Image (cartoon, rainbow, N blue to C red):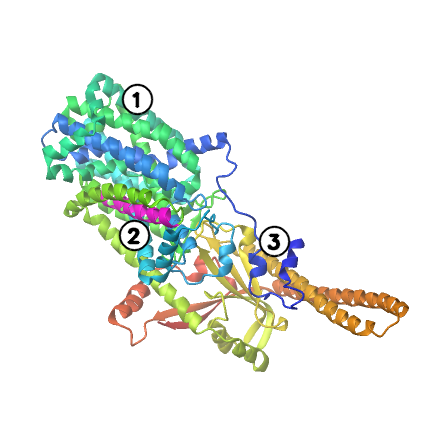
Amino acid sequence: MVMNGGDDAVVAQNKSRTLRRLDSLDVEASRIPGWQDLNKGFSTALILKLAFESIGVIYGDLGTSPLYVFSSTFTSDSPPHRDDVLGALCLIIYSLSLIPLIKYVVVVLSAHDNGNGGTFALYSLICRYAKVSRFQNEQVEDQKLSGYRLPSPDRAVRRAARIKQALECSAFAKRILLLLTLLGTCAVMGDGVLTPVISVLSAVDGIQTKKASLTNDHVVLISVAILVILFSIQRFGTEKVAFLFAPCVFVWFLFISGIGIFNIVKHDAGVFRAFNPYYIIDYFRRNGKQGWISLGGIVLALTGTEAMFADLGHFSVPSVRIAFSTVVYPSLLAAYIGQGAYLLKYPEDVSQTFYKSIPGPMFWPMFIVAVGAAIIASQAMISAVFSIVEQSLALGCFPTVKVVHTSSKFAGQVYIPEVNWILMILCVIVTGSFKTTSYIGNAYGMTVLAVMLVTTTLVTLIMLMIWQTKLYIALAFFIIFGTIEMVYFTANLYKFTQGGWLPVAFSSILVVTMAVWHYVTSRKYKFESDNKVSMTSLVSRLESDLRLSRVPGIGLMYTQLVQGVPPIFDLFVDNMKALHSVIVFVSVKHLPISFVPVEERFLVRRVGSKEYRMYRTVVRYGYMDSLIPHQEFEDLLLGSLEEFIKVEAFALTMLDESKHREDFDESEDSSSDSLHPAQEKKSGSGSNQEANATSISLINQRTEELETEWEFLSKARIDGVTYLLGSSVVEASPSSSIGKRFVVNVLYDLLQRLSRKSRVALQIPHKNLVEVGITYTL
């Protein structure tokens, strides 16, 4: 932050002789750059480059769906009828056209959060428009961040205002919004288990068409070996192999589209009849309930669609749209139509449709590319899980785990050891237990559709409340896509006992974990807020306690509070009988925006009088930001403190000068009435000199105070920085209900024991740490 002529805004109206509170953080919060459009200024060449790269990162999962869709749709031992093949293909064609192309590419991608997508992005948009956030430590200053603001609508719409008011006034609606967000997030995390399993297993399974001596157990063992290797190399990060992703998947799309065209020409060009929607009606008329059940296999053609939105932050909206419209969508249509043409001639090969339809000389090249594409699809989903867990951590919805940043160039590339090994164990268990893609497909569809339903609901709310779309358009969006997705979802529910229970179990465990952690964290904040130290008590301790000594150095006392002095202060003083010469209360906040610019990260205020040398700083991060290393953090903090005392000194100088000028003008007015004109002129000249001398004296005095305070801070930094943390124990009050005691004393206690300590999560050096025990009774 740099001082400029705009600092005059710090001074309030001179005539009223008042000044805006210097500890209100308005000074720093109001000094921000303008609105930042992350897609602004992208050249055509850069957009095309990003479009090519997105093929490897985003579309691996969606692109590998042809490996298993038809085999998961027709699970009967008897070959499907020709009209059934056309009906299933017709469903695939229109599902791909409606969900990925129209819903996501045309509509959902527009609901990004400063260039970032995913369930949290939708939730953050709603939270910034309406006060529905369940996160406690919010401030008015946060809304002045460049990334926080939304474009104002051209005109007020009463419907949008009513929806906003209804959400803000309903605690139930706020809980439902948060629950939907957590549900969508947990469903994507469930994909992190199922995507590697079904992708790798279906790719390796094709080897049986050439090596009949290999059994299913051999395929499972090979798949498990690939999965173990895949998870073992995660610690190296995706950056080192990312340059291979796009070319490999691009080659995959070229292969499947080329083979698809080959099959159409060779086997049955009449397959294009599947574009006639009549075959959908005929499919259900012919098969009835069995046709509805088979939707659980057809929906697998849509798996990976959510990645278009979830991984948007790595690219741009135009690049993702171009890649899907020009490469992915045409290639998938050619692949599925080609497989349909092959099945019209060889329906008995439905269990191995993909590999059986490959021309002989192309089998081994295609097999190698298929395994590579499956691994890439798995890698993309694993990386997405890491990113989601990091976002959940930032918003206080996940137990503390270690986050390792594997790239110095891309902040979003992270590795989380605990999550990685848990995913690997679950993938191995699922692969060994289910063994076939048909059962895993039953489970896979549940997670995909859960995310889609949540996205449809939240985007509809955004259309009504933020975009202020016409009511009939928003309702049409919700009804059309919600109905399609719900029909698919009910078909998967029918297979609940055949594998559908697995994602429900995963999601339930994750939702309970995240909800419990968020609930107790919010209650801890309320406890601190209700028991904070009053300024009267603070002054009494600092001025009257003869046993309290101030030792050299800076003490950084961490707290969740953004207002007031935390209760840990009293505990620290009672236990240590000493305070550092400079105390800074540090509150780390994660806001519902993607990034916070460095120049907007720190907000500073003074606590008490100058001689106390006590400050408060609020350190703000977006949910995609990385924590600052402690050495850099200390440098930035000292820079922010210096900036604050400069602005404060300038503002006080302006106030003193204003007061002096007003007093001088009043005395001049009272004396000028009794003076001769010549005497008045001479007196006025002398008075102006006196006023200027007084102003210079005031400026010199404030400058001297500023230099003295800065020298004191610099010396304290040299003496050392100590981090002061509370080692907390949380317990439910004896009068609490049985359910609350179980949640707090059992579930949260277990999660807290399994999670990493705060000092590790905040990257605090152990040698500079002092912890004080504190008990939260909720």
What amino acid type should be assigned to the residue bearing mark 2? Leu
**Which residue is rendered at x = 21% and y = 40% of the image?**
441
Q: Nearer the viewer, residue 674 or 314?
A: 674
Image quarter where the C terminus lies is bottom left
| Label 2: how many Cα within 10 Å (few below 14, some 14–19, many 20+) | many
Mark 1 in CB contact with mark 3 (< 8 angstroms)? no
Q: Which residues are magenta?
A: 443-465
Q: Nearer the viewer, residue 283 or 508?
A: 283
Give the SS element for disc 3. Answer: loop
Circle 2 residue: 183
Circle 3 residue: 1
Residue 525 visible in image: yes
Mark 1 in CB contact with mark 2 (< 8 angstroms)? no
Look at discs 1 and 3 and give the one toward the viewer.
3
Query: Any mark on residue 258, and which?
Result: 1
Q: Find out whether residue 131 is within the magenta segment.
A: no
Image side of residue 288 versus residue 245, left or right = left
| Label 1: how many Cα within 10 Å (few below 14, some 14–19, many 20+) | some
Residue 3 visible in image: no
Give the SS element for disc 2. Answer: helix
